[in-house]
Amino acid sequence: MARTDSPRRWYLFDYGNVISTPPTPSDWEVLAEAAGVDRLQDPGSAYWRYRIAYDAGALTSDEYWSLVRGSRAGPPRAAWLDALDASQWSHLNPETLDVLEDLEARGEHLAVLSNMPAAMAAQFADASWTRLFRHLFFSSSLRLVKPSPAIFERVLAELRTAPWQVTFVDDSPANVAAARAVGLHGLLFDPSEDLWRLLAEGLAVSPASQD
């Protein structure tokens, strides 16, 4: 991709576990009770087993929640479960928000890239945090999921920028590695670390040719 003349970088942020905090145990209990399935938070549960397909837009809400439940979930129940699911992922990280608000106030270019099903993206459409971003990229609308290199290439094309002009922040090592392989400046998010320092140190070690 040809290098652009844009004077500013793009800051591309993941949503879950970066802008938001993880669901609480009580959140998972409420969702599990509504779904009729225990321990949905476990890595091997049906919630996660079919999640990539749901995030990719390959499953409807009814289809996904039916697979999670192991029995038919009609539209009303699926919509209810989607609402509970969105609610448990709606708790925002105040430290991340502080950084985002400062970046936005400085006129920096901000965007989101999240693996997120269409139902959840729709419920977040009017959320206050979305106003900080110039672009919102969700896997379900792109029909691509992280860590596929294709999703990063699609975002770069939409932003009309070069990979070295993008700083990408995500909590998944696989996603960060994939972004770096495409040429983005990938930073691994850790909620226990200072995000401002991570961004500053990350840019400090960027090759001069990519500033």
Image (cartoon, rainbow, N blue to C red):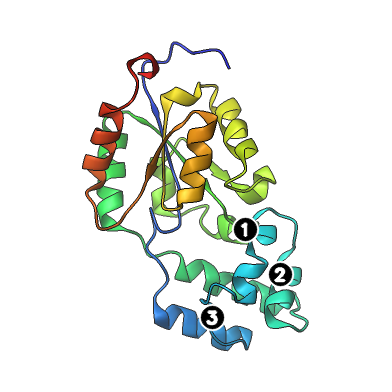
* Residue visible at 25% across and 53% down in the picture: 95
Pointer 3 local density, CA inside 10 Å: few below 14, some 14–19, many at least 20: many
The alpha-carbon separation of the residues under discs 2 and 3 comes to: 14 Å
Q: x, y (%) of residue 2?
A: 55, 12
Relative to residue 159, is residue 208 depicted above or below? above
Q: Is residue 6 left or right of residue 33?
A: left
> Looking at the image, do the residues carrying marks 1 and 2 touch, with CB atoms under 8 Å apart?
yes
Q: Mark 2 points at which residue?
A: 64
State the residue at coordinates (41%, 83%).
Answer: 26
- Residues 106 and 39: in front is 39
Q: In which quarter of the image is residue 10?
A: top left
Q: Mark 3 points at which residue?
A: 31
Tell me which amino acid carries mark 2. Tyr
Q: Please identify the quarter of the rendering in which residue 66 is found.
A: bottom right
Which quadrant does the C terminus fall into?
A: top left
Real-space Cα distance between discs 3 and 1? 16 Å
Q: Considering the numbered disc 3 on the image, is that residue within a helix, a strand or a loop?
A: helix
Residue appearing at x 45%, y 57% in the figure: 16
Q: For mark 1, does the 10 Å Cα neighbourhood hold few (<14), some (14 to 19), or many (20 or more) residues?
A: many
Give residue 117's mark: 1
| Number of marks present in the image shown | 3
